[in-house]
Structure formats: C-alpha cells, structure tokens
Amino acid sequence: MVQIIGFEKKQSKSKESYSVLILQGEPEVMISKTSQRPYISARRASIPCALDENQAQALIGKELPGSIERVSCAPFKLKLATGKEIKISTAFQYLPPESVNEKEVAQ
C-alpha cells in the first residue's frame, strides 16, 4: 500500500499546467553508505491526476494498493546541495497491483 501525502501543480515544458499526487511507500530501514548506521526512509513518487484541486486535496491521507519501486529511466544529471553533479539512471515509480484484465490481455 502507498499513501497519498500531497498534491502539486506543475508546468510542462510546453508551459501547460497539470496536477500530480505525491505518494509515499512504507517506511523501510536503510544502511548509510558512509557511516554504516541504520536509518528509516520511505520511497516517494508522483503520479499525474485529472482531478481538480479540491478533489485532489480530499485524497491526502488515503491509501492506494500497489507499491513504489525503483525503475530504469533515461539518464539525467542532478546537482546536490554540496554542488557536486551526479548522473542518475533510475527513478521511483508507483506500480499498481496487477489486475485480472491485464493478465488476460498479456496471455
């Protein structure tokens, strides 16, 4: 299950406005690469929505079936707060549970 934790208005490269819901997965224990100490984190992803702002705001706090998984994507550069630039080729994406209809079409 994932929880809807927010709503944002965004603008596409073509200057069109659209809305996204911000989703958060279950908390999970991670191990720091630098200190080797455990900490808790949760994966986050966004998903476009065709709801008006009031409807989207009303969904905050609700849960959706599915999970947030790391998936491959086109490489992109990200500038860290330290000023260091890194190249990333994965992203977190919401994956809904498989439905019966999708399984039938795939066969």
Image (cartoon, rainbow, N blue to C red):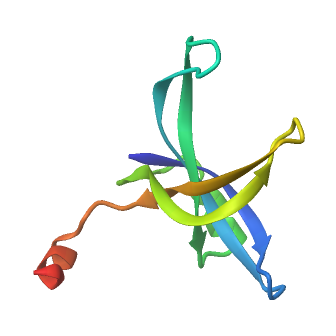
Q: Quadrant of residue 36?
A: top right
Q: Is residue 107 left or right of residue 31?
A: left
Q: In this view, does 9 lie above or below 27?
A: below
Residue 58, image x, y percentages:
61, 58
Choose between 4 and 34: the one closer to the eye: 34
Residue 25, image x, y percentages:
48, 42
Identity of the residue drawn at 61% across and 75% down:
51
Looking at the rendered structure, the number of numbered marks drawn on it comes to 0
Choose between 100 and 90: the one closer to the eye: 90
Q: In this view, does 99 lie above or below 33?
A: below
Q: Quadrant of residue 24?
A: top right
Residue 5, image x, y percentages:
61, 47
Q: In this view, does 87 lie above or below 106?
A: above
Choose between 89 and 8: the one closer to the eye: 89
Q: Is residue 15 left or right of residue 100?
A: right
- The quadrant in which the C terminus is found is bottom left
Identity of the residue drawn at 60% across and 51% down:
60
Residue 21, image x, y percentages:
61, 61
Q: Is residue 50 left or right of residue 54?
A: left
Identity of the residue drawn at 59% across and 71% down:
48
Identity of the residue drawn at 45% across and 47% down:
2
